[in-house]
Amino acid sequence: MDTLACIKRVPDTGAKITLTEDEQDIDTSNLGFTISPHEECAIEAAVQQVEDHGGTATVLSLGPDDAAEQLRTGLAMTADEATLLETDGEEWTPRATANAIADAARGDDGGPAYDLLLFGNESADAANHQVGVRVARALDVPFLAGVTGLDVEDGTAIARREVGGGTEVYELDLPAAVAVKEGINEPRYASMRAKMQARKQEIRRQTPERDGGRGTFEKVRLEAPETDDADAEVLGEGPEAVPDVVELLRDDLEVV
Amino acid sequence: MILGLVEHAGGEPTEESLEALTLAREVAADTDASLDAVVFGVEGAAATDRLGDHGVETVHHVADRRLDTYAPEARGEAVAQLVDAVDPAAVVAPGTTRGNEVLAHVGAVRDLPMAANCTDVDAGEEYELARQRWGGSLVEHARLDAPTALLTAAAHEFSPEPAAERVEPSVREFEPSLDDAAFRVGVDRVEESDVEGVPLGEARVVVGGGRGVGSAEDYDELEDLADLLGGTVGASRAAVNEGWRPHDDQIGQTGTKISPDLYVACGISGAVQHMVGCKGADSVLAINTDPEAAIMQKGDYAVVGDLHEVVPELNEALRSEA
Ligand SMILES: Cc1cc2nc3c(=O)[nH]c(=O)nc-3n(C[C@H](O)[C@H](O)[C@H](O)COP(=O)(O)OP(=O)(O)OC[C@H]3O[C@@H](n4cnc5c(N)ncnc54)[C@H](O)[C@@H]3O)c2cc1C
């Protein structure tokens, strides 16, 4: 069973986000980079399937030269191979990204070269919600988004996703593609040794063509919305505040 | 014409669908266009009456029985065929897992761009729009120019207002031609959750606990508070990562988005990625030891103090109220 996990290099914005002066990007002069959280889970799911069923796990990223760093994290998480679809660092549209990934994931027979393709449900930064579907349709394989549970049995991927009050279960014949969400698993922590080893591993590089398609969708600028910085009304300190809290809940908010 | 994609539960349009229709109606007004809707399933036609309240003139009802259970690829194909047949200037779907997924299929099979989770759309010759990035902590202003604009409406960004004037919608049956292959992905079965109480996304009161709660056991106090308020417990990512709560409980960018009347945030600092998950809350009450915590600005009400002292005392007081 061969798996492919597609990941994106994104700024590590646990902290406050500031924008570059031209408002085109997040100012990353003081930020590190990371893998989108959902996609970290995609890598974990890919290597788990290989642990259970044999085969190889490949991590793939479309991005700048520096995205090799995130691919090495994937290798340190025990992926076997890594492919970088190298760009000039400019942001690609979901369509162009998907076409480049589909080309790279296509086998000699025109079909997918992998049994299971894994994506994050949406990237942390652009959140376009469509790269996975577009790759799946280009390769003509079944696809499901929002996956928070995944088992493979006898050539079938059993995928689960949460709906209010329950879980929907889907069965997808392999080869298939899924977009996973945080919560599907706990991504493993790469050991120092694994990281050292990953540094020596080869990263395959390709330079894809960026194609257009019908219609255009262009970013004009980014904006960090004003947050309402009015202080909350302090009802009091410690347990002494309780009578005021009860009054608020009862009289103003009417929740009791 | 602008086409709204409507999801329903037993013939009743979902909240998110009505929000999306509100955006669709704005786009229609911008361009002097009429508003249509597409609904699926045998019970879909029952939604027609409600859709009239929202200004929908024609309801395209896809009654293929095979579509009674949700099948993303088949629905995407059906919408794509409807787009070919009625040529809308835009299709607007709710920014839910299903809405984003179905519309992305349309984008893929008709080679059209799609803008997910829009918060504002200015429609004209081209579409100038704003959409959520970073789970809502950043806004992207973008330009979309396509034969059909595919848009999803960010959940809980639009209030589902009825139209100024009700219309009497006409219903048109739409028969897509779908071969069995389109149904290769569909809900096989639904497993009921064994978690009792209201799902997080629908709860009227949510009591959230963060790293400040300190342990899995200490959530008992929060459970009690939630019970007393008829609500449900949620958590921050930090608490989930600690293993104190299951991921289903996570509120935020990579968790559930909630829209309760009241959110009580206990021992939660108020990181942007958390706050985008509770933006829909009418009121936020924070209980936190740190008066400088971000939640003290972002919330509406605050108690400065140790939640382990405040919450049990509050539970006592609420019990004696009852
Ligand atoms: C891409 C990305 C996605 C993310 N998605 C999410 C998400 O979906 N949801 C989410 O929540 N986070 C998310 N995060 C993480 C987020 O940035 C924060 O790290 C997280 O929300 C912090 O959780 P916390 O507030 O519980 O913990 P902390 O930030 O550690 O805050 C704990 C708070 O508890 C208070 N406290 C401590 N002890 C007590 C006590 N006894 N009584 C009262 N108060 C006390 C402290 O003063 C502090 O304010 C995401 C991050 C990234 C980068």
Image (tube, rainbow, N blue to C red):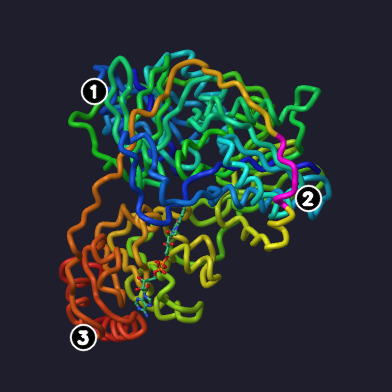
Asked if residue B222 lies left or right of residue A21, the reply is: right
**Location of mark 2 (residue):** A50
Q: Nearer the viewer, residue A16 or A170?
A: A16
Q: Is residue B271 magenta?
A: no
Label 3 to label 1: alpha-carbon separation: 53 Å
Q: Residues within 10 Å of mark 3 (few under 14, many from 20)?
A: some
Dividing the picture into quadrants, the one containing residue B319 is bottom left
Give the answer, above or below, for where B182 lies relative to A156.
above
* Residue denoted by label 3: A240
Q: Quadrant of the N terminus of chain B?
A: top left
Assign the C terminus of chain B to one quadrant of the image.
Answer: bottom left
Q: Is residue A200 magenta?
A: yes
Q: Which residue is depicted at the point 51% across and 66% down?
A: B240
Q: In the depicted view, which residue is nearer to us: B64 or A99? A: A99
- Crowd tier of the residue under label 2, counting other residues whose Cα lies within 10 Å: few below 14, some 14–19, many 20 or above: some
**Residue toward you, A256 or A120:** A120
Q: Point out the quarter of the image occupied by ligand 1.
A: bottom left
Q: The numbered mark 3 sits on a residue in which chain?
A: A
Q: Which mark is residue B316?
A: none
Whether the residue under disc 3 has CB within 8 Å of ligand 1: no
Label 1 chain ID: B
Circles 3 and 1: CB atoms closer than 8 Å? no
